[in-house]
Image (cartoon, coloured by chain):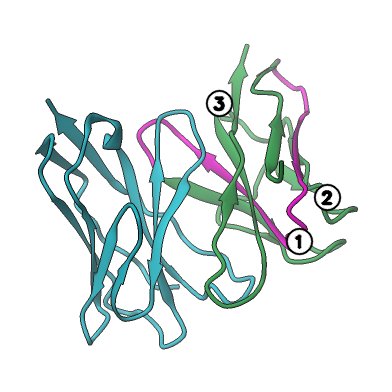
Amino acid sequence: DGGITQSPKYLFRKEGQNVTLSCEQNLNHDAMYWYRQDPGQGLRLIYYSQIVNDFQKGDIAEGYSVSREKKESFPLTVTSAQKNPTAFYLCASKRTGIQETQYFGPGTRLLVL
Amino acid sequence: LAKTTQPISMDSYEGQEVNITCSHNNIATNDYITWYQQFPSQGPRFIIQGYKTKVTNEVASLFIPADRKSSTLSLPRVSLSDTAVYYCLVGDSGGYQKVTFGTGTKLQVIP
């Protein structure tokens, strides 16, 4: 089955702790994205990557970091600098070409203890 | 990036046709219009995409006037399972460019 997987489904962070959210895709997509969604709100772009070893900041990158060492993987680290990390995090990927759309993973809900 | 404006919420009875309109006044020549559906605690799911005139698939229709400054998502005969948030996005689907999700339209289907 092709698709995008995110793990874990729920993640708890203690004060001052860095946590990493996993995103893997086997769709052979070039582009990958990370979004944050707060309750009752739309999606806001954190980071995106067009190709391996390259990524760009989105609209709310402060307090987050990413890496893209492999085409199929785009992990997101929520650092201690992110003071309000409680949210629903969504990963997406997309193929290049006309009329290609984003495919989303199931999401990870991050909670602060 | 073209900004989009949608109604915050809509209610509809089961079995009715629902039309959700999205405004995108500064849409660029290369931009496509894409609609996604999102259920609570799930990732958005692609519904339909179009560039101009009318597009229809098995779940929805998309109407785009000649000036492309707005678009209307039409859901025929909605059921309770269509209760969700619907997002209108405008962007260059041919490239890697980021697209911007607005707050979407929360559709509540009533029995």
Q: Amino acid at mark 2?
A: Ser
Say left or right for A109 vs A28: left
Q: Amino acid at mark 3?
A: Thr
* Colour for chain A in the figure: green
Q: Amino acid at mark 1?
A: Phe
> Label 3 vs label 2: CA separation?
21 Å
> Vertically, is B94 above or below A41?
below
Q: Can residue B34 be seen at all in this image of the molecule?
A: no
> Vertically, is A85 above or below A58?
above
* Colour for chain B in the figure: cyan
Query: According to the image, label 3 marks what residue?
Result: A86
Label 2 with label 1: CB-CB less than 8 Å: yes
Residue B60: in magenta span: no
Label 3 with label 2: CB-CB less than 8 Å: no
Q: Chain of mark 1?
A: A
- Between A6 and B2, the one lying in front of the other is A6
In primary-sequence order, the first of circles 2 and 1 is 1
Residue most toward the right?
A: A69
Report the magenta residues as a range.
A14-41
Name the image quarter holding the N terminus of chain A: top right
In primary-sequence order, the first of circles 3 and 2 is 2
> Label 3 vs label 1: CA separation?
23 Å
Query: According to the image, label 1 marks what residue?
Result: A55
